[in-house]
Amino acid sequence: MNAEEIRKQFPILGQEINGHPLVYLDSAATSQKPIAVIEAVKHYYEWENSNVHRGVHTLGSRATDAYEGARQKVAKFINARRTQEIIFTRGTTTALNLVASSYGPSVLSEGDEIVITPMEHHSNLIPWQQLALRTGAVLKYIPLQPDGSVSLADAESTITPKTKIVSMAYVSNVLGVINPVKEIAEIAHRHGAVMVIDGAQSTPHMKVDVQDLDCDFYALSGHKMCGPTGIGALYGKKALLESMEPVEFGGEMIDDVGLYESTWKELPWKFEGGTPIIAGAVGLGAAIDFLEEIGMDEIERHESVLANYAMDRLSEIEGITIYGPKKRHVGLATFNLEGVHPHDVATVLDASGVAIRAGHHCCQPLMRWLEVGSTARASFYLYNTEQDVDRLVSALIQTKEYFSDAT
């Protein structure tokens, strides 16, 4: 793939920041949007805007076709067995909360176990934490190896016959590590537990096959994979979704409403109460088309090369600490410069037109495990190049010199 040519399809990347060409290295927080996605959303509002599943007029039919067509694209993209197994949500956070709020209470009793890891994003920690508090279940953590990875031996010893739910990020948003979720799903199933995967950081960067992973639930966000904000999806195995009760009630998700009791529509609509995120779904469908045209294998290969280059270049900087395994397959580097607060690093880099992330990255337990308050993070995507890495390294060297001179 030609990242320089792909970059031209992202209008926002053509601007200057503080007098310098923009180098955007914060795609793990949110990706930029190509013209194809922007135009798809614009076309929907100009030609198809209507509510779905309700009207029999032409615009209503167009909107419904566009919305349900996007669902089919998501199902195909992650290789779900059925489109009914795809629930549109606001994003990964909402999807994980749906599982915790609807599925969790139906299977957990006091003393049962929920197993996660210390590297989880707060969105895949707090819902389980709250569920454990409500049900009396025990929240357990698979320990991390010294480099931040998870070993199958530790997973085997942590997951027990009392475990009912195992939930884990496919890819850490801080460490860049790819977790062995397929193998851990097998361990979970052997003990009668379900496997929930936080796919926020994996779906944009690699080919995902939920049937091959044999996960029971898989959550994703559109805005991290070139789609609009406010749209995502939950995949769930049909039998499990059918056993779950809705957590939002109102229009669209009902079958029949009486004065004292009501019944729900079939999957997937029983979980999509109210007017859904129609334009967002259309934009997500366009993003999937865009990514598939390039090829997920090509994207993964490009990012692997770029990540390895970034590791080598960053390692040249004296006084830098890089966190997580050195061998990684996603374009992400988390680091700190000795003696410089990460927020100061990000501020000085921004003055040079380089956008990175600084903070705890919604992973405070992991920050404590790393024994730091916060870190800087540069994350790469299909539109980044080795020249972007060079700009990052040059700006970091300047930052280091600036603070050395200041002291």
Image: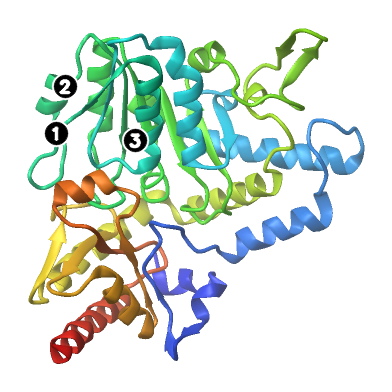
Quarter holding the N terminus is: bottom left
Quarter holding the C terminus is: bottom left
Q: Earlier in the sequence, mark 1 or mark 2?
A: 1
Question: Judging from the image, what secondary structure is the residue with disc 1 in?
Answer: loop
Question: Judging from the image, what secondary structure is the residue with disc 3 in?
Answer: loop
Say what amino acid the circle numbered 3 marks.
Answer: Leu
Q: Is residue 401 above or below residue 328?
A: below
The answer to whether one can see residue 379 in this image is no
Q: Residues within 10 Å of mark 2 (few under 14, many from 20)?
A: some
Residue sitting nearer the eye, 209 or 109: 109
Q: Earlier in the sequence, mark 3 or mark 1?
A: 3
Q: CA distance from mark 3 to mark 1?
A: 15 Å
Residue located 80% across and 13% down the image: 257
Q: Quadrant of residue 395?
A: bottom left
- The percent coordinates of residue 385 (x first, y second) are 33, 72
- Which residue lies under the disc numbered 3? 125
| Apparent side of residue 292 relative to residue 137 in the rendered image (left or right) | right
- Which residue lies under the disc numbered 1? 143
Say what amino acid the circle numbered 2 marks.
Answer: Thr
Residue 158's label in the rendered image is: 2
Q: CA distance from mark 1 to mark 2?
A: 9 Å
Q: Earlier in the sequence, mark 3 or mark 2?
A: 3
- The percent coordinates of residue 224 (x first, y second) are 46, 53
